[in-house]
Amino acid sequence: MKIAVACNGNNISQHFGHCEGFYIFQLENEGIGEGEFVKNPGHKPGFLPKYLAELNINTIISGGMGAAAVNLFNENNIEVVVGATGDAKENVIKYTQGQLQSTGSICHEHEGECH
């Protein structure tokens, strides 16, 4: 399983499309690795969900995202977890332990950060 976390630095971005990049964590029997940072290739409508699907991502964790992005992730069989804050790896650990649930909150504001 591969989990992508939309980040600014090590912290979760409040809007995945405007993040600096994605920490990608591979889950294996041994646990969670350190994660690989992949720079955001650019925010174009509909691009990032397809891009992350091509990287074989199973789950995306972010502070927030718009409804169109959520729909595109769902079409690509990628689980969406929104409403997360704080350190990327800590949230992945919480997710794998069943302690991180999506708030389901969808961004309707695309100017600046979503809250």
Image: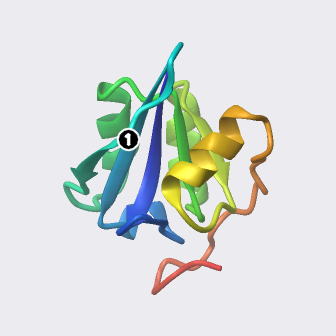
In the image, is residue 92 above or below residue 20? above
Q: Position of residue 50 (x, y in %)?
A: 35, 36
Looking at the picture, tell me which residue is in the foreground, 93 or 108: 93
- Read off the residue under disc 1: 34
Looking at the picture, tell me which residue is in the foreground, 20 or 91: 91
Q: Position of residue 66 (x, y in %)?
A: 56, 61
Say which element carries label 1: loop
Q: How many marks?
A: 1
In the image, is residue 11 above or below residue 6? below
Toward the front, the furthest residue is 30
Toward the bottom, the furthest residue is 112
Q: What residue is shown at x 31% (from left), y 47% (from top)?
A: 47
Q: Quadrant of residue 9?
A: bottom left
Looking at the picture, tell me which residue is in the foreground, 14 or 71: 14
Q: Quadrant of residue 74?
A: top right
Q: What residue is shown at x 46% (from left), y 86% (from top)?
A: 112
Badge 1, how many Cα within 10 Å: few under 14, some, many 20+? Answer: few
In the image, is residue 63 above or below residue 5? below
Q: Position of residue 29 (x, y in %)?
A: 53, 13
Q: Position of residue 103 (x, y in %)?
A: 78, 57
Q: Relative to residue 89, is residue 103 drawn left or right? A: right
Q: Label 1 sits on what residue type?
A: Glu
Q: Relative to residue 25, is residue 104 drawn left or right? A: right
Toward the top, the furthest residue is 29
Q: Quadrant of residue 56?
A: top left
Q: Relative to residue 3, is residue 49 drawn left or right? A: left
Q: What residue is shown at x 75% (from left), y 34% (from top)?
A: 97
Looking at the picture, tell me which residue is in the foreground, 108 or 54: 54
Q: What residue is shown at x 19% (from left), y 54% (from top)?
A: 41
